[in-house]
Amino acid sequence: MIRFLAVIAALVTTAQAWDLAGHQLVGEIAWLNCTPEVRAKVEALVAKLDTSYNGGRTYNFTTANAFLDDQRSRPHYEWGRLHYVDLPKTDDGAAFALPEPPHVVAAIEDAIKALRDPQTPENKQAEALAILMHCTGDVHQPLHACTWDDRGGNGYLVGGVAFADLYKGGKGNLHAFWDEAYRVKAQDGKIVESFITPPITSRVGPGEPGIIATTAVAITRQFPTTSLAKEINDLNPTDWARESHILGCTKAYPPGPHPTNYEVRTLTPEFGTAAQKIAVRRIALAGYRLARVLSDLFGKS
């Protein structure tokens, strides 16, 4: 049964994936794994992006990964359906089958085609690059490829999480939890954030001191390329979505039936700890794979 009342009760805007810090982490990890030539070409192109929702500051290799979410408050935002792919939850995720576009997999593929086409205008190339960077992060978040009649967990209300930076008016829900799962920890019987997303005014460039650079290095040490070599070599976005779908079906939802209407499910510290390990690994994979794709696109002189 479609959980219409649960969706209405959530009273949330469409959630992002990952949150703004998570997307910048994907970009930072990609930057760490790209050559100076690729870095320079990416920087030159993202510098042409609209800065209206970035405090008027020019985008860089890291912050450009947040461009699509920065733009969400813009009137007539046209990229909403590019962030996810609606795939119904099953017990094991084995019945994976992509629907007709638009969805996140098609968005990645279309962006790559646009970047390979010499006829694509420069401003559209910049947007295509931002879409590629952002959606590569999105497709690695489990609840951007799985839904239990609840908009990917947006209609699944949760407690036991000390959310510090939800959107204004937002309610704690499972999707919002997974958006920040890479930066949570168990403390005093609750799930708390280990750091807060830096505001736009405090964003820095790739490699510059700050929580994004520090965390990106820590993630690459926890999951070095050698530990993920086989998966990094898989550059098929459909496979990325399949991985997330299986995780969404088998790991992203707490055990038990779906909450009904206004019921709030309390997440346990054990669930938070397990989710954090999954999320960090997915952030690492997204960054490494993005680096590979960017190197293929921009690594030829």
Image: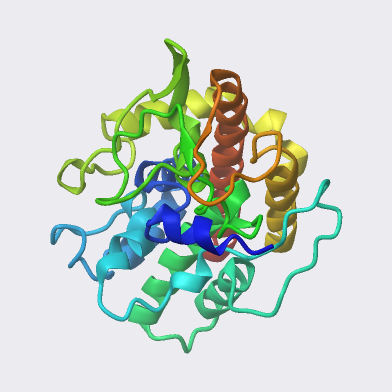
Q: Does residue 223 appear in the picture of this structure?
A: no
Q: Residue at x 58, y 78 (%)?
A: 102
Image location (x, y in percent) of residue 184: 45, 26
Residue 233 spot, x, y in % from top left: 73, 48
Q: Nearer the viewer, residue 111 or 183?
A: 183
- As drawn, is 282 to the left or to the right of 5? right
Q: Is residue 286 left or right of residue 39?
A: right
- Return the residue nearer the eye: 285 or 244: 244
- Nearer the observer, 21 or 125: 21
- Above-or-below relation of 163 to 50: above
Task: Relative to 133, say whether 262 is above or below.
Answer: above
Q: Residue furthest right?
A: 94
Q: Residue at x 34, y 76 (%)?
A: 77
Name the residue located 24 percent from the left edge and 71 percent from the top edge.
50
Q: Quadrant of the N terminus?
A: bottom right
Residue 107 visible in image: yes
Reply above or below: 261 against 283. below
As drawn, the residue found furthest toward the bottom would be 119
Residue 195: horizontal and vertical position, in percent?
A: 33, 27
Residue 237 is drawn in which quadrant? bottom right
